[in-house]
């Protein structure tokens, strides 16, 4: 991202140039959204897990065991694991839930399996814990298979509230915690699944772009979230967080968590308002180190680094990781403890 880009120099120098840049962006937004309706559902994407959404160390396990039964999918299993532990295999909760799948020892004693065939059932080993999570899900799905409603929803409800409550309620019970749990996991599932059709445009995108535009030329600040005490300055994820906060969507503070705030369009399907991400490890979303707001034409608005200002930058660089089309439900589903 060197300074040789003439277009960047033109856009970030002076108020008139910024105004020109803003006009350019809004033309792109209008142009893209005029044709967006014609694009939706006209092309199918690939099935399976979204690129890099599951860390490479666990991707094969999630892909394999996520197909253990019809009620489960790799993306659904990934959503559960992310919600439970944020892919941390050593985490312990206040309730003594342990490891990447957050099994309580008493539950592990009856439902843990030897997933890697080494003769041990190790609650801390993802090669055992991930298969055990899938096995436990599918066991619950069998218990509630005759209950009315969506079998995957009922399986998740049984995971949260117990199979008896799902059976006696005739579906997801009217328990706020359980209903919220089911909704969160199903929303997160969309973030971990590779889209199978074109994604609908985000209705909040234009507002997020407008906020980012208004900050063009603002000096970068590491850790900046735009507070008065920070002189209204931002770092990369602080800018994207503030841009979507402006339109009523609360994103996590850091870029690698923002990646899971919605489904992931392919590079050729980017629309203005999508968040675009960059990493030195293109196999693991947890390694993402930079984010910007896509504005169209191959450019984003971003807060790049110390010594620079919020500006336009190209997205097509070797460290381009992928993109997220932020949704309100996707953002609300993100765990707060990862």
Image (cartoon, rainbow, N blue to C red):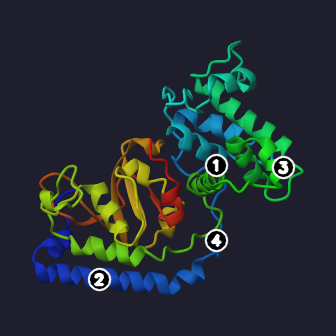
Q: Residue at horizontal 43%, vertical 42%?
A: 286
Mark 3 is surrounded, within 10 Å at the Cα level, by few (under 14), some (14 to 19) or many (20 or more) other residues, namely few
Please report whichever mark, 2 or 1, sits nearer to the chain's N-terminal start: 2
Q: Residue at horizontal 50%, vertical 31%?
A: 93
Q: Which residue is mark 1?
A: 75
Q: Are marks 3 and 2 in contact (CB under 8 Å)?
A: no
Mark 4 is surrounded, within 10 Å at the Cα level, by few (under 14), some (14 to 19) or many (20 or more) other residues, namely few
Q: Which residue is mark 4?
A: 43
Q: Residue furthest right?
A: 146
In space, the residues marked 4 and 2 are separated at their CA atoms by 28 Å
Identify the disc placed on residue 121: none
Q: Percent from the top left, x then y, of residue 229?
A: 13, 57
Q: Is residue 101 left or right of residue 91?
A: right
Please report whichever mark, 1 or 3, sits nearer to the chain's N-terminal start: 1
Report helix, strand or loop for mark 4: loop
Please report whichever mark, 4 or 2, sits nearer to the chain's N-terminal start: 2
Q: Which residue is mark 3?
A: 168
In space, the residues marked 3 and 2 are separated at their CA atoms by 58 Å
Mark 3 or 2, closer to the camera? 3
When the figure is inspected, residue 98 is found, relative to residue 207, above or below; the finding is above
């Amino acid at each position: 991202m060197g300074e040789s880009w003439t277009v960047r120099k033109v856009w970030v120098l002076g108020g008139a140039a910024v105004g020109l840049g803003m006009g350019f962006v809004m033309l792109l937004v209008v142009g893209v959204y005029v044709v967006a309706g014609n694009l939706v559902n006209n092309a199918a994407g690939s099935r399976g897990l979204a690129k890099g959404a599951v860390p490479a160390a666990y991707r094969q396990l999630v892909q394999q065991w996520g197909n253990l039964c019809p009620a489960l999918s790799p993306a659904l299993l990934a959503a559960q694991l992310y919600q439970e532990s944020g892919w941390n295999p050593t985490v312990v909760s206040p309730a003594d839930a342990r490891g990447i799948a957050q099994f309580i020892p008493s539950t592990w004693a009856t439902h843990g399996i030897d997933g890697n065939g080494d003769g041990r059932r190790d609650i801390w080993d993802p090669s055992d814990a991930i298969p055990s999570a899938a096995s436990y899900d599918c066991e619950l799905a069998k218990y509630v298979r005759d209950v009315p409603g969506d079998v995957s929803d009922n399986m998740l409800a049984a995971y949260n509230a117990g199979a008896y409550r799902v059976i006696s309620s005739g579906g997801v019970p009217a328990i706020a915690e359980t209903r919220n749990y089911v909704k969160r996991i199903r929303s997160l599932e969309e973030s971990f699944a590779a889209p199978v059709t074109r994604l609908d445009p985000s209705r909040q995108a234009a507002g997020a772009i407008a906020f980012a535009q208004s900050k063009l030329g603002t000096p970068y600040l590491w850790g900046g979230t735009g507070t008065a005490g920070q002189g209204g300055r931002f770092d990369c994820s602080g800018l994207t967080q503030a841009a979507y906060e402006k339109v009523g969507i609360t994103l996590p503070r850091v870029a690698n968590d923002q990646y899971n705030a919605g489904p992931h369009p392919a590079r050729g399907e980017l629309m203005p308002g999508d968040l675009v991400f960059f990493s030195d490890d293109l196999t693991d979303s947890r390694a993402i180190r930079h984010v910007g707001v896509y504005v169209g034409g191959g450019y984003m608005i971003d807060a790049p680094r110390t010594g620079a200002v919020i500006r336009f930058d190209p997205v097509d660089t070797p460290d381009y990781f992928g993109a997220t089309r932020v949704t309100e439900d996707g953002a609300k589903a993100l765990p707060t403890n990862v």
